[in-house]
Image (cartoon, grey):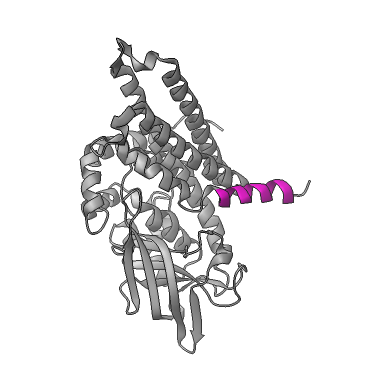
């Protein structure tokens, strides 16, 4: 694997970093935390104009057809500025799933996503902390003209701002079976759908979404009835790589904050960066960050080559999640008491570090996959 970026990739990175540094400032993030939607529609349109919302989607669907490695480069820059946007749920999961198995009519909606005119929320996880598809209980009762959904979804990002919900429900069987799971693309404002914002340590916009007798047609089924996990598993694997890149970016920025503070902060007549404990903190963290970064890029590279990356995607997700938790935690300690004050920009990263560890399946979920690959793979 050649780790040197191409000229086009350097341009993508530099353009994204310049834009996000200027537009996605700490003050902007604090404003978005208090906003109704949880993201800036203006910034979302600007991201669309730069082609970011179609970067990894097929050209046949209106995307740019760029590689997973290119998406990783962009995701790292979004992570460095902890950019609050529905990019991950809309582009990384929903558009990817539609491009893979959507009907001709459903694939036509990707153009709306690419143009910044459609936001999609991923309604997957439920009240159980288990991320496995076998834990899904949302009931989709079949009727002559379609299905009726009843149940609750948890941790649905941007549900209140979404135009569409990608909801995963059970059409047959029961937990812990992965069979009998079906995906639906549903109008987010349909009768019977309600949501309540759930407070999080990161103060981002997560919701509890309730389905009460929500009627959906057969045309709103994404893929085949009862086989959603076969479609979603590779989508989630790719999403795990992208999310790993995002939190690597978070870790890099937090480490830079901490390193600069260690150089500038004078205590007992010398910069605190000259103290052995601080040096040890910074050295250990950068080793973790480089490891997570390399593993994520390696996994993206192999996915682009068409190779099976189930084990590597799990390793990247588990390792990068622990890295962002450690970096934001230890990095805040380097700031001392200041690192835990609301006025400190580093606190924005600290509050998100632990939550990012749990998103898209906690470390335990991905470690289970790693163990399966190690123990069940034929010799």
Tell whether position 370 is magenta: yes
State whether the magenta stretch is mostly helix, strand or loop. Answer: helix
Can see residue 233?
A: yes
* The one of 111 and 331 positioned closer to us in this rendering: 331
Quarter holding the C terminus? top right
Where is residue 66 shown, x and y percent of the image?
Answer: 44, 46
Q: Report the residue at 37% width, 44% height from top.
A: 352
Q: Is residue 371 above or below residue 231?
A: above
Task: Tell me the quarter of the picture where residue 216 sits.
Answer: bottom left
Query: Is 37 placed left or right of 90 in the picture?
Result: left
* The one of 270 and 207 positioned closer to us in this rendering: 270
Highlighted range, magenta:
364-376
Query: Is 316 placed left or right of 197 in the picture?
Result: right
Q: Is residue 216 above or below residue 373?
A: below
Where is residue 334 shown, x and y percent of the image?
Answer: 37, 26
Q: Report the residue at 46% width, 84% height from top.
A: 146
Tell whether position 2 is magenta: no
């Amino acid at each position: 694997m050649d780790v040197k970026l191409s000229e086009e990739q350097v341009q993508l990175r530099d353009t994204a970093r310049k834009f996000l540094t200027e537009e996605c400032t700490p003050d902007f993030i604090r404003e978005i935390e208090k906003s109704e939607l949880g993201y800036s529609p203006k910034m979302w349109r600007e991201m669309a104009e730069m082609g970011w919302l179609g970067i990894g989607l097929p050209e046949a669907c209106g995307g740019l057809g760029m590689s997973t490695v290119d998406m990783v480069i962009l995701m790292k820059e979004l992570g460095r500025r902890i950019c609050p946007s529905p990019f991950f749920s809309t582009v990384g999961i929903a558009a990817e799933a539609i491009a893979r198995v959507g009907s001709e009519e459903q694939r036509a909606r990707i153009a709306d996503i690419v143009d910044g005119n459609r936001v999609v929320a991923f309604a997957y996880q439920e009240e159980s902390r288990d991320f496995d598809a076998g834990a899904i209980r949302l009931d989709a009762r079949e009727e002559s003209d379609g299905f009726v959904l009843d149940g609750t979804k948890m941790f649905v990002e941007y549900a209140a701002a979404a135009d569409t919900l990608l909801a995963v429900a059970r059409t047959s069987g029961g937990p812990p079976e992965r069979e009998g799971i079906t995906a639906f693309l549903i109008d987010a404002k349909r009768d019977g759908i309600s949501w309540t914002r759930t407070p999080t340590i990161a103060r981002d916009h997560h919701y509890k979404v309730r389905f009460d007798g929500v009627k959906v047609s057969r045309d709103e089924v994404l893929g085949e009835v009862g086989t959603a996990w076969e479609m979603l598993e590779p989508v989630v694997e790719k999403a795990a790589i992208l999310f790993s890149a995002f939190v690597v970016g978070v870790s890099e920025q937090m480490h830079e904050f901490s390193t600069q503070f260690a150089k500038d902060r004078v205590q007992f007549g010398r910069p605190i960066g000259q103290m052995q404990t601080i040096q040890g903190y910074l050295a250990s963290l950068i080793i973790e960050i480089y490891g997570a970064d390399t593993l994520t890029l390696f996994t993206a590279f192999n996915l682009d080559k068409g190779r099976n990356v189930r084990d590597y995607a799990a390793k990247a997700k588990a390792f990068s999640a622990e890295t962002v938790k450690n970096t934001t935690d230890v990095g805040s300690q380097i700031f001392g008491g200041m690192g835990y004050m609301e006025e400190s920009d580093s606190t924005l990263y600290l509050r998100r570090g632990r939550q990012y560890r749990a998103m898209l399946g906690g470390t335990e979920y991905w470690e289970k996959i790693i163990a399966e690959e190690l123990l069940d793979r034929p010799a």
